[in-house]
Amino acid sequence: MESIVLIVHVLLAAAIVALVLLQQGKGAEAGAAFGGGASQTVFGSQGSKSFLGRLTAIMAAGVFATSFALAVFAKQKAESVNDAGIPAAEVIESAADAQQELPALEGAGAEKPASDIPVAE
């Protein structure tokens, strides 16, 4: 299900990019003086502003909906990772505290690790 929503999300995003590139900017009226305005009647007498604007708004609403759905899927995955046997922070902290409480075995026959750093005794 998540893969389908992700594919729809990517397709909607690409469609929005294409729709925005198809729309005329606010300065497009100046180009009509050079003969470009008469051929722009593909979408009816009102032009493409209302049609492409509404279509872009619908696509944007779809992108918001799929983004929300993908966020819900991500939250569900994050909750399921916590149940996958990964210890909680409290368990890790208590294990670290238990290691610090163990008595040091100094002089009990254990050899000191060899290192290049001199130790003052």
Image: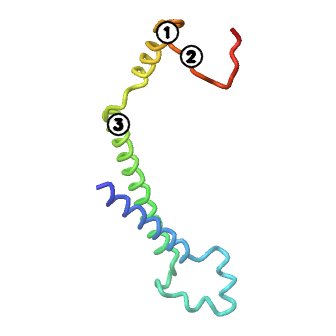
* SS assignment at label 3: helix
Out of 46 and 19, give the one closest to the viewer.
19
Residue found at the very far left of the displayed protein: 1
Q: Amino acid at mark 3?
A: Glu
- Taking the spot 43% from the left edge, 59% from the top edge, the residue there is 63
Out of 91 and 74, give the one closest to the viewer.
91
Q: Amino acid at mark 2?
A: Lys
* x and y percentages locating residue 40 in the rendered image: 54, 87
Which quarter of the image is occupied by the N terminus?
bottom left
The residue indicated by pointer 2 is: 112
Q: Given contact means CB atoms under 8 Å apart, are the residues at marks 2 and 3 in contact?
A: no
Q: Residues within 10 Å of mark 3 (few under 14, many from 20)?
A: few
The residue indicated by pointer 1 is: 109
Q: CA distance from mark 2 to mark 3?
A: 45 Å
* SS assignment at label 2: loop
Q: Is residue 50 above or below residue 62?
A: below
The residue indicated by pointer 3 is: 79
* SS assignment at label 1: loop
Q: Is residue 33 above or below residue 88?
A: below
